[in-house]
Image (cartoon, rainbow, N blue to C red):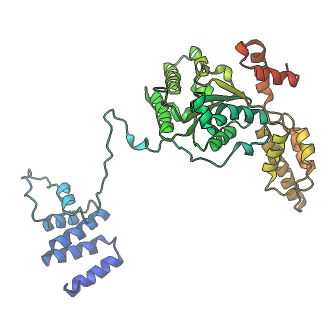
C-alpha cells in the first residue's frame, strides 16, 4: 500500500516471496500491530497459525491484536492461559477458511456422506444387441421379453403390459451374460446399475437389507434403468439351505423390492439377473411378477465365435488366418476360452520372436496349437447341469437345457 512505511512494504514483498516463512510473517504482523493496524496484524497472524498451529509467538500476537477479546478467567498458579480459537475464527473468518470441517451425522449414527455416490449408475451405453455376435435365439427372446413392449407403446397400453419385468440369464461361465445385459440396457436407452454380493452384504445387522433397498431406490430415481444382479445364487440363495438369518433377510428384502411398494413403483425398472447355478436360487424369486422369465445362455455358436475371434485379433499382427477353419475347431469353447486362445497364440509368436531374434506375425499354426491346448471351461458346468436336467426339471423349467444336451449327445 502506498501509505505504508517502507519497512512494512519491504516485509510484505519478502513475505510474498516466502509465504511459508513464519518468523518473517510474524515480524510483519508485529510491525502492523505497532502501527495500529490490528486487522492487518490479525490476518497475518492467522496465516502464520495455518502454517504453525502450535506456535506460541503467533498465538500471543493474535491475542494482542484482538484486543477486544474479553479477559481470560484467572488461571491457577503454574497453568498457562488457553487461546480462544472460536473468537479468533470469528475475527478472521473472511480471511482464512475454517481449519476443521464437521460432517453431519444421522440420528441413527449412520454417515450419509457415502450414500450420495454409493451406487455407480452408468449412463445409457452404445452397446446394442446387434453387437452380440450370433445367439439369435437369445436375442429373439430378449426382444419378446423387454424390447417389443417398449417399441410399441400403443399396443402395450392396449394389452395392459407394464414397463416392468424380471429376467434370469443362466448358463456356463464365460458366455457373455453380463455383455448381453448391457446390450439390453443399450437397446432400452436405459441406465445400467450392476450389483454384486459384495455391494450389498454388510457385517452390521440391518445394513445389508438397507443396501438392497437403496439399490432399487436409486434405480427408481434413474428410471428407465436396468438393474443387473450378478451371481444371483449368492444374493438370492435358497432360504431353506441358508443357516444365517442375515442372508435370509437379504432374500426377503429382494423379494419385497421386486414386488414394489405398489403396482407402479417399479415402472421403468428392468431387473436382469445372471447365475451359473439357477437351481440354487430361491424358488420365490422365480415366481410370476419377479424373475419369471428364464433364458439359457450357451457357449457361442458359429457366428458368435467368429465375431469374438475377430474382436480379440483386431489389434494383433496376424497373417493368413482362416477364420472359418478356426471357428470349426473351437466349437464348444466359451467366449472367455476364445479370448484365451487369442492370447496364447500371441504369446507363442512373441516367445518365438524372442528366441529367433526375428519378429514374425501370428499365424494359423499358433492359433490352432493354442485351441488344441484349451480345455473347454464349460464342461464341468454341463456335468453338473446334466443331473439337474434329468432329475430336477419340474414344470419344464430346464427344457431348453435338456434340448441342448440331447442335441450335443450329452444326455
Choose top left, top right, bottom left or bottom right for residue 389.
top right
Residue at coordinates 18% horizontally, 62% vertically from top-left? 91
Towards the viewer: 391 or 8? 391
User: For the point 62% across and 33% down, which residue is it?
Assistant: 155
Observer-nearest of 200 and 48 = 200
Give the side of residue 60 with respect to residue 150, left or right: left
Q: Is residue 168 above or below residue 193?
A: above
Percent x, y of residue 178 = 67, 38
The reply to whether residue 381 is in sight is yes
* Residue at position x 69%, y 32% in the image: 144
Asked if residue 104 lies left or right of residue 267, the reply is left
Q: Quadrant of the C terminus?
A: top right
Q: Residue 247: image x %, image y %?
A: 52, 22
Work out whether 118 lies above or below 207: below
**x%, y% of residue 25?**
27, 73
Q: Nearer the viewer, residue 284 or 373?
A: 284
Amino acid at each position: 500500500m502506498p501509505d505504508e512505511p517502507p519497512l512494512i512494504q519491504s516485509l510484505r514483498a519478502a513475505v510474498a516471496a516466502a509465504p511459508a516463512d513464519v518468523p518473517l510473517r510474524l515480524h510483519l504482523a508485529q510491525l502492523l500491530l505497532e502501527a495500529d493496524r490490528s486487522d492487518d496484524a490479525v490476518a497475518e497472524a492467522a496465516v502464520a497459525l495455518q502454517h504453525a498451529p502450535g506456535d506460541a509467538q503467533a498465538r500471543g500476537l493474535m491475542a494482542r491484536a484482538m484486543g477486544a477479546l474479553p479477559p481470560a478467567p484467572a488461571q491457577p498458579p503454574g497453568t498457562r492461559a488457553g487461546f480462544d480459537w472460536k473468537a479468533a475464527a470469528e475475527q478472521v473468518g473472511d480471511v482464512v477458511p475454517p481449519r476443521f470441517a464437521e460432517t453431519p451425522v444421522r440420528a441413527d449414527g449412520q454417515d450419509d456422506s457415502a450414500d450420495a455416490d454409493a451406487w455407480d449408475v452408468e449412463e445409457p451405453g452404445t452397446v446394442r444387441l446387434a453387437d452380440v455376435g450370433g445367439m439369435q435365439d437369445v436375442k429373439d427372446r430378449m426382444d419378446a421379453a423387454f424390447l417389443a413392449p417398449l417399441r410399441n407403446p400403443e399396443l402395450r397400453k392396449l394389452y395392459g403390459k407394464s414397463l416392468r419385468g424380471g429376467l434370469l440369464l443362466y448358463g456356463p461361465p464365460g458366455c457373455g451374460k453380463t455383455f448381453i445385459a448391457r446390450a439390453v440396457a443399450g437397446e432400452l436407452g436405459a441406465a445400467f446399475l450392476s450389483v454384486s454380493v459384495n455391494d450389498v452384504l454388510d457385517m452390521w445387522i440391518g445394513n445389508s437389507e438397507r443396501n438392497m433397498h437403496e439399490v432399487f431406490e436409486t434405480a427408481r430415481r434413474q428410471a428407465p434403468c436396468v438393474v443387473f444382479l450378478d451371481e444371483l445364487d449368492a444374493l438370492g440363495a435358497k432360504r431353506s439351505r441358508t443357516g444365517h438369518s442375515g442372508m435370509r433377510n437379504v432374500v426377503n428384502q429382494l423379494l419385497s423390492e421386486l414386488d414394489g411398494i405398489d403396482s407402479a413403483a417399479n415402472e421403468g425398472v428392468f431387473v436382469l439377473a445372471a447365475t451359473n447355478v439357477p437351481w440354487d436360487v430361491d424358488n420365490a424369486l422365480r415366481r410370476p411378477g419377479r424373475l419369471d422369465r428364464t433364458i439359457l445362455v450357451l457357449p457361442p455358436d458359429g457366428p458368435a465365435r467368429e465375431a469374438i475371434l475377430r474382436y480379440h485379433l483386431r489389434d494383433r499382427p496376424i497373417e493368413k488366418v482362416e477364420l472359418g477353419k478356426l471357428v470349426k475347431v473351437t466349437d464348444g469353447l466359451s467366449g472367455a476360452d476364445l479370448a484365451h486362445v487369442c492370447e496364447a497364440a500371441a504369446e507363442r509368436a512373441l516367445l518365438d520372436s524372442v528366441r529367433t531374434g526375428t519378429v514374425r506375425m501370428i499365424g494359423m499354426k499358433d492359433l490352432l496349437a493354442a485351441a488344441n491346448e484349451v480345455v473347454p471351461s464349460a464342461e464341468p458346468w454341463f456335468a453338473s447341469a446334466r443331473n439337474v436336467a434329468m432329475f430336477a426339471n419340474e414344470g419344464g423349467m430346464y427344457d431348453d437345457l435338456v434340448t441342448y444336451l440331447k442335441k450335443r449327445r450329452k444326455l
